[in-house]
Amino acid sequence: MKIVFFGSSHFALPALKALIKSGHELVCVVTQPDKKKGRHLRLASTDVKSIAMDAKLKIFQPEDIKAKESLNSLKKLGADLFVIIAYGQIFSQEALEIPAIMPINIHASLLPRYRGAAPINWAIINGDKKSGLTVMYVTRKMDAGPVMLQKEIKIEDDDTSVTLEEKLSQGAAEILMEALRIIDGKSYRLTEQEEDRVILAPKLEKNDGLIDWNTPAVDIHNQVRGVLPWPGAFTAYRGKMLKIFQADSLALFPSHKPLPGEVVRADKHGIVVAAARGFLEIKELQLEAAKRMPAENFVMGHKLAAGEILGKKS
């Protein structure tokens, strides 16, 4: 089959590499335009473009995939299939009708659960025990097309959104190869999604990282795991932002009933903070304008003591 691949982020790389080796004719790789990055605002290309250049593939970087010029360029490629993975632009109906067979997308959730921009993050934040991948026929409605294939992936207790994304990106390469096999053999079946089971996964906002100590410790632990690498989980400490990168929830039986956000232990073994129910053991953290460090180092350097309250703005 003649395939056009659409992708921009690191998540798409394993699938692109597998497609290059697959024996199918990869007629073009479409990715986001180069953008200025860093302190010196130098132009930087996407990870996908770098792989495509190394493979000497045709590359197309339209500012707007829906523009007339973009559509004309895509039509000239004579594609049988569009493969879309973490591309970053919305397709018009005209664009979706270009491939002779169909456009497919690989989404990082078990649809209809977690339609939207941040399915991996919300699966962790919500404490899910499994995630997965969906190959679907692309329609104009976001992540709502009929499902061709799905693959479950277990979420381990120590998984973060970063580690889960890596697992899913590797899995995306495997499920793509399976999808191409059944499409080529005309042995696929498309199943409509159940709209009454839809859960949305909107793009994360800065405040999604703000810790509310009036919630259970297990929920805060899931939040810490799920908001990496951005915005990161954070609270207030002596008027400054304190970011928490690694933590765990645990049950303790202190001699008094602590307030939510109260430090109940701060010593060479680490930091333990009370939540509405249970306790959060902080293992790695970073104070505003300081270095990231293990909790025991923070205790020694900042004289943190039991009884202090985290979450106060001043």
Image: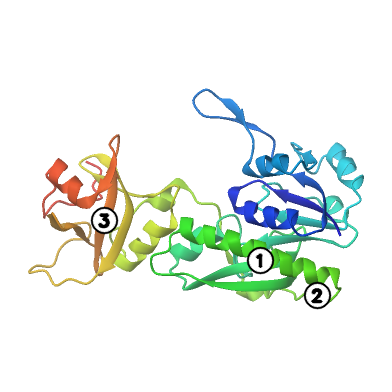
Q: Residues within 10 Å of mark 2 (few under 14, many from 20)?
A: some
The residue lying toward the viewer, choosing from 50 and 110, is 50
Helix, strand or loop status at disc 1: helix
Left or right placement of residue 153 versus residue 287 in this view = right
> Label 2, on which residue?
188
Q: Which residue is mark 3?
A: 283
Q: Residues within 10 Å of mark 3 (few under 14, many from 20)?
A: some
- Give the residue drawn at x 55%, y 52%: 203
Distance from disc 2 to disc 3, alpha carbons, whole Å, reads 47 Å
Q: Disc 2 or 3, which lies upstream in sequence?
A: 2
The type of residue carrying mark 2 is Tyr
- Whether residue 297 is situated above or below residue 175 in the rendered picture: above
Instruction: Give the residue number, with chain letter if any, for mark 1.
Output: 174
Q: Tell me what residue is drawn at x 52 percent, y 22 percent.
A: 40
Mark 2 lies on a secondary structure that is loop
Residue at the (61%, 47%) spot, across then down = 9
Query: Disc 1 or 2, which lies upstream in sequence?
Result: 1
- The disc placed on residue 235 is none
Percent from the top left, x then y, of residue 174?
Answer: 66, 66
Q: Do callouts 1 and 2 mark residues in contact (Cβ within 8 Å)?
A: no
Question: How far across and down, in percent of the image, does residue 49 sit?
Answer: 69, 41
Q: Quadrant of the N terminus?
A: bottom right
Residue 178: which quarter of the image?
A: bottom right
Instruction: Name the amino acid type tagged 1.
Output: Glu
